[in-house]
Image (cartoon, grey):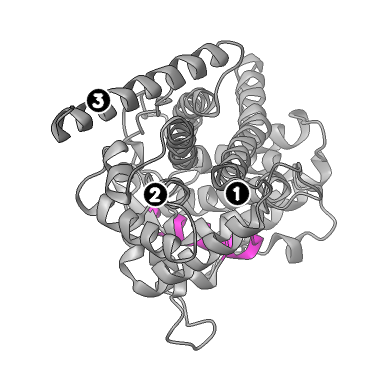
Amino acid sequence: MATPSRTRALRSTAALLGTLLVLAFTSAQAQSAPTPLEDNRTITLGYIGIAYELGGIIDPTLQPGGTSSARPNWFTFAPHASQAGGKGMYGAALARHFIDSARLQPSLSLTNALDRLGLSGVLRLRLQDLSLQLIAQGLTVDAATALSVMTSALNVSALGDTRTLLATASRMGALYWSAPGTAPLDKVEAIVITLERTLHEGNLAIFNDIGGSARLYLDWRAAATGSITPARVLTEFTLAGASNAQAQQAYAYAVAHAEDSPRPTRMDLLFPGMQWKSLLIAAFALYEDARLAPTPARRDALVAMGTNFVAWREQHDQAQSVFTPASSPTDEVSRAAVLQILTPFLMTDFGTVRWTYADYAYAQPDRDGNPLTSPPCEYSWADFWDRWNGILFAFEQAYTRPTELWVMPEPLTDPLG
């Protein structure tokens, strides 16, 4: 008869073998196309290259791998934002891995489930608290753990506010019960797939549009003869879907109002009816103007206006259509609901400057006047204005420590690759 210790050892060995089988199968499947995290790695590296090329236009002393005290432009922020999205995909990948393992061998307890994930310290305690709240709503141990681990690469310290913990568990539970599928892990998988697709599609859409436009601009600039001036950018450089006349309008306004306080941010009111891709041409012209600015203060004001132009195009046209699509695949849940759940956990490390959505929310006036509602749970990343104002807050925070943004992130590696 097997001893208890031998039984545990056999179970651990079986779990390990099951995990290895899942990893081998997943790896074989992945040979045909890049995984979301592999795409994210390529995108983050692409942004780093563009950041140094464009940063070198604004500050000609900037060298690849170096730093600049000039105000960071949008493309300096981009590698860090891309990696932040990658962390969400990383959590989704861990959740999918856990689901696959749990299908082969269900966890014996919550402790067993957390042990299988190799969690420890504060992270383990926070996910344990969230899992217990989900189990209390009727979820199985494995379903609860898989949902919790989606947040593991994000700002789980937000769960230290009991109000955030309870609201998150309530929203996760409601989404779980509404998810397609009958088996618990099928329902959770629909939520995980929704998160992964949303972040992946947004990452690709933004990079292809804005990163692609920057690459076209840099190539045009390299091939141009003579000195590059803002006027030449506005008349000679073109982008499909953009209007040079509209770009000139936006540029003229920015030059006149770059040093306004507060800085103009409501592009919808300033330029009604504009094709927002035109703002990219205007931004490149502003970055060129910043290079020629007579003072650092004027340079930084022009950079900030150009960055706001790019960010508006990014969030208004590219991200929003992915986050709140007109229709979704039948194997998904509401993308907006998933993003609302994760809003309190969002964070981005801009080099050594950490921004969290929770910090932004706590700094704002109380929206509903209810002390039982935590401020981060009163916002949703799927809502354009909630996202836009949070991003502007992040920009201003990072502008106070410009050189630190040049500590570029180490691109993530797919844990299942």
Q: CA distance from mark 3 to mark 1?
A: 54 Å
Q: Is residue 2 above or below residue 289?
A: above
Q: Earlier in the sequence, mark 3 or mark 2?
A: 3
Q: Is residue 186 above or below residue 13?
A: below
Quadrant occupied by the C terminus: top left
Element class at badge 3:
helix
Q: Residues within 10 Å of mark 2 (few under 14, many from 20)?
A: many
Q: Residue at 48% of width from left, 82% of height from top?
A: 366
The answer to whether 338 appears left or right of 180 in the picture is left
The stretch drawn in magenta includes residue 372: no
Element type at marker 2?
A: loop
Q: Which residue range is magenta in the image? A: 380-399
Front disc: 3 or 1: 3
Quarter of the image where the N terminus is located: top left
The reply to whether discs 1 and 2 touch (Cβ–Cβ < 8 Å) is: no
Residue 382 location (% of width, % of height): 63, 57
Instruction: State the residue at coordinates (35%, 47%).
Output: 402
Residue 197 picture location, percent across and down: 62, 38
Between residue 357 and residue 228, name the one nearer to us. Answer: 357
- Magenta residues, dominant SS class: helix
Residue under pointer 2: 154
The tag earlier along the polypeptide, 1 or 2, is 2
* Residue 311 badge: 1
Q: Is residue 383 magenta?
A: yes
Q: For this rendering, which residue is in front, 347 or 291?
A: 347
Q: Mark on residue 10?
A: 3
**Label 1: which secondary element:** helix
Q: Mark 1: which amino acid?
A: Ala
For the question of whether residue 292 can be seen, the reply is: no
